[in-house]
Amino acid sequence: MRVGVVIPNCMEGLIFPYPFADQNTMIQMAVAAEDMGFDSLSMNDHFTTQHYVARMWPAPPRYYEPLMMYSYIAAVTKRVQLETGILVLPMRDPIVLAKQVSTLDVLSGGRVLLGLGLGAYREEFEAANAGPNPPPRKALLEERMQALRELLTKPKASFEGRYVHFKDIEMYPRPIQNPVPMYSGGNSRAGLERAARFCDGWLPAILTSTEVREMIAQIEGHAAKIGRDLTGFDFAVQQGISIARTQAEARERFLSSQLWEHLKSLKGSTLKEQRIEDIEAHSFIGTPEDVLSRIREYRAAGATSLPGLIFAVNTPKDALESMELFATTVLPEVKKL
């Protein structure tokens, strides 16, 4: 299994306390992840402060643009894949985004993995579309997914939709990968259908192994209806993790982390159908042996990669120590699965 770690470019104030992540912290974590043997990095995407974060912290957190941050990281790493987990596509022009992704894929030597989604916080979209009659997010997302695929795969791309229109766009330099792997982010039913229709993988977050199994079956059902073969499709699960030498220590660290506060904030959106109060069922919490056992459950349920491990920590030092513990005790066994 491919295993990756979340880099906190847009997680300060959400998953990690404020202040936490500056550019030097992210470079340090990225280089350490590659040195430790992780296969990929994951970054999130935010444009402005969420309402609950503004209530919690006295100053706005620092949200670094992921593709620009990855261009910096690509220059100091050689192997790790660079995954967006996720880019909020309704907030991004598909032509500009295609140019950015193509450029980053060339600069990194073909290491980009493109996770795309609706975005968990509607208030960000509303702040950026404050005029009358804003376009519907879901329709915009689906059109832009299709348009982005055209731009990244066709030497000369055209698209005519309700919200997206362009003609004879020649996007050069071409990305090294053809196609650049595209993932549908999110746990919703619509996200599952989008994964089957448009994408090379599915990128959910904080699910139980039973939910993973059931949702994979739904994606397979959607694919069968349209006659699509899912050979090579990546069921890429993002999970919270708290790893320690004892189960009690791991549980205490998880419940005292900003990650736990973040998960509670998502009960009205991304995690509205998950019973996240059962923390052991939705995250990897415990000793290295406990964590490895849980990962095996997810592999048996159909997960093919773990690209976004979100360590439940409150300092960069704790993050690096937790990554090191996982890398030395769990990672070698997970790569065999």
Image: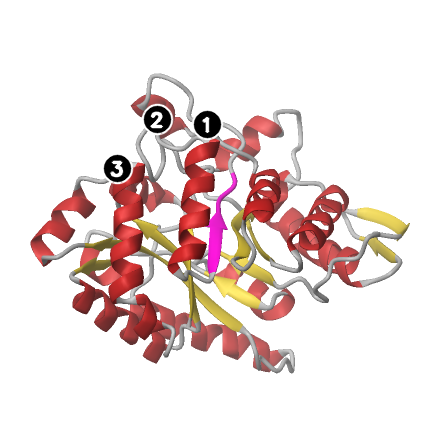
- Under tag 3, what secondary structure? loop
- Under tag 2, what secondary structure? loop
Q: Quadrant of residue 286?
A: bottom left
Position above or below: 230 against 243:
below
Position above or below: 288 against 214:
above
Q: Which residue is mark 1?
A: 62
- Residue 213's spot in the image, x, y percent? 37, 75
Callout 3, which amino acid?
Asn
- First in residue order: circle 2 vs circle 3: 2
Residue drawn at point x = 41 percent, y = 45 percent: 29
- Residue 58's spot in the image, x, y percent? 33, 17
- Residue 100's spot in the image, x, y percent? 71, 45
The quadrant the C terminus occupies is bottom left
Task: Give the CA separation, mark 3 to mark 1.
Answer: 16 Å
Q: Residue 19: give its label.
A: 2
Write down the region rendered in magenta.
40-45
- First in residue order: circle 2 vs circle 1: 2
